[in-house]
Amino acid sequence: MSIPFNNPLSIPVLGFCAYSGTGKTTLLKKLIPELNRRGIKLAVIKHAHHNFDVDIPGKDSYEMRKAGARQVLVASHVRWALMTEDLVDDAPKLPHLLQQIEQEKVDIVLVEGFKKLALPKIELHRAAHGKPFIHTHDDNIQAIACCDDTELPTELKRLDINNVGQIADFVIAYIKQWQPSQTQRPLQAPECGCELDTSKTLSVRQGIDSILSFVNPVMEVEQQAIDDSSNRVLASDAISPVDVPQHTNSAMDGYAFKHSEPMLAQYTIVADVMAGHSYRGNLNDGEAVRIMTGAPVPAGADTVQMKEMAIEDNDTVSFSGSISLGQHVRQAGEDIAKDHTALAAGHRLQAAHQGMLASLGFGTLPVYRKPRVAVFSTGDEVCQPGEPLKPNCIYDSNRFTIKSMVKQLGCEVIDLGIIHDSEDALIDALKGAAAQADVVISSGGVSVGDADFIKLALEKVGQINFWRINMRPGRPLAFGQIGNSLFFGLPGNPVAVMVSFMQFVQPALRKLAGEKDWSPSMVPAIADCTLRSRSGRTEFTRGVYHLGTDGKLHVSSTGAQGSGMLSSMVKGNCLIVIGEQNEQLNPGDTVYIQPFADLL
């Protein structure tokens, strides 16, 4: 049985596998110079099955390592070598070894050994050795290099083990046709529109897609002063009433003139053009104007040379350096053309959008009405913060977390407080909330087997699905409709509430608000610790990401991951998303993170 393998590089990796004594090393010693002769740059990783050493006793590097240095790097002007002491129980992990390769300097990595890994390989076989084939239990064999006496199935590519040129041809063809595998990102939308069976446990992606199918964006539009439009969603395309820039203008302080080939030895300066002013005449051949950044380029001029590359002599100027037609000139409308769309409807307005639209002269903007969201907590055990804590009770934190996230998304909050465990009280609360809100959100009371009254109340006032989502934390989720309002019943654990809100409520509220083409940020990072999950389940681990000394994002978990540990959300700045296909990610593996910046 093959061990799974994911190539972490953007170049191909090709293995050579065979039983001992077949001649792997002998072949590679001949193949490497042949590939080099043909211009192929390559690296080789060899798996040794014993206690090998590449250093010589008595040398400084050897003595330093034996004295306790975990890593020793020896370098000269022709080569450098890094020797690492790394005692592990099993063979070193090939993906980790591959990441030590400077992949930008090679075209392919050839691997000798690691025959149990599911990586593409060439099998070496000699009939005289009487050994069984490897390809019969390894689907990753690309070809078999064998002797004339070997009998092979016709579907396998046959190579002559004694013909190094033929094997080199195959390797080069493999490099040319190789394509990096498509990275399977967590929560990626499926390509097929398969019908959803909500009676079963759902994946996170299935839950998101099902919820979004019920969301209809608000249609009411209101005019909002541009100063007050932050975080609102633009309701119609903003069409530019002017060209940006409005005039063809200079991008530099310098001199504007008409370009010619060859350039003239000198030009007569006829005027100064300051920003906000213009030269009304037509610039003739051999004339130039001093011009400031942003000032309109005069008619007849088409090129600007910066003042640092100019020499003035009384009323004339000459230029040095290379000059190309149209340099340092910004054409009218090259940023935004008049009557063209400056910003499409569906954008959530932020500082850059507001600044650009203000530069076009917009004083007010058409925006969609803010979605109204009613929020309440349930349970007799929940107490209001600021009041004395009753025996056997807890303070309500979920409602405040939810309200804050709702406000971050530009929605209007209707706070219904704490609804105690009474079926009649919950029915009244749900009906009242649905009458005034687009969305109703509760926390607690959605786990199968709970004695909470909310389930009974929901069955009488709306159409509700109680789902199990294959995720941790946040497995139970209730979603449905109460009249014309959407309902979300989130778990009771504080961390599960935040994670569930980010994954399910956030995309629904963004679509409801009219925001188009939104998707959560999913950023690759390098794991600095071991991360475990269960195959078939999506795990959301609280993490801390930072920029490493290698210039790449690194991430580690915040530690203990209990669903009630709010401190882990405070310590963290992201969720590490471990997809359904992963059971364990090791240090050095690429993971995906969702930064908190958008919401928390």
Image (cartoon, rainbow, N blue to C red):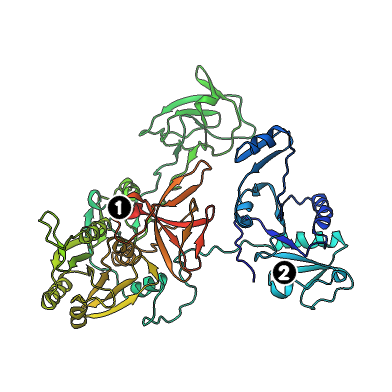
- C-alpha gap between disc 2 and disc 1: 50 Å
Q: Earlier in the sequence, mark 2 or mark 1?
A: 2
Q: Nearer the viewer, residue 482 or 501?
A: 501
Residue assigned mark 2: 141
Question: Quick one: quadrant of the C terminus?
Answer: bottom left
Q: Which one is nearer the viewer's eye here, 223 or 270?
A: 223
- Disc 1 residue crowd, few under 14, some 14–19, many 20+, Cα 10 Å: few
Q: What percent of the width, then of the height, locates residue 155?
A: 76, 77
Give the number of callouts.
2
Give the image quarter of residue 434.
bottom left
To which residue does mark 1 refer?
A: 567
Tell me where residue 413 appears, x and y as whole percent. Answer: 19, 61
Per the image, label 2 sits on a secondary structure element best described as strand
Residue at 54% x, 37% y is 327
Q: Is residue 492 rendered to the left or right of residue 207?
A: left
Which x, y percent locates residue 417?
14, 64
Please determine whether, in this image, residue 587 is positioned above or below residue 181: above
Residue 509 seen in this snapshot: yes
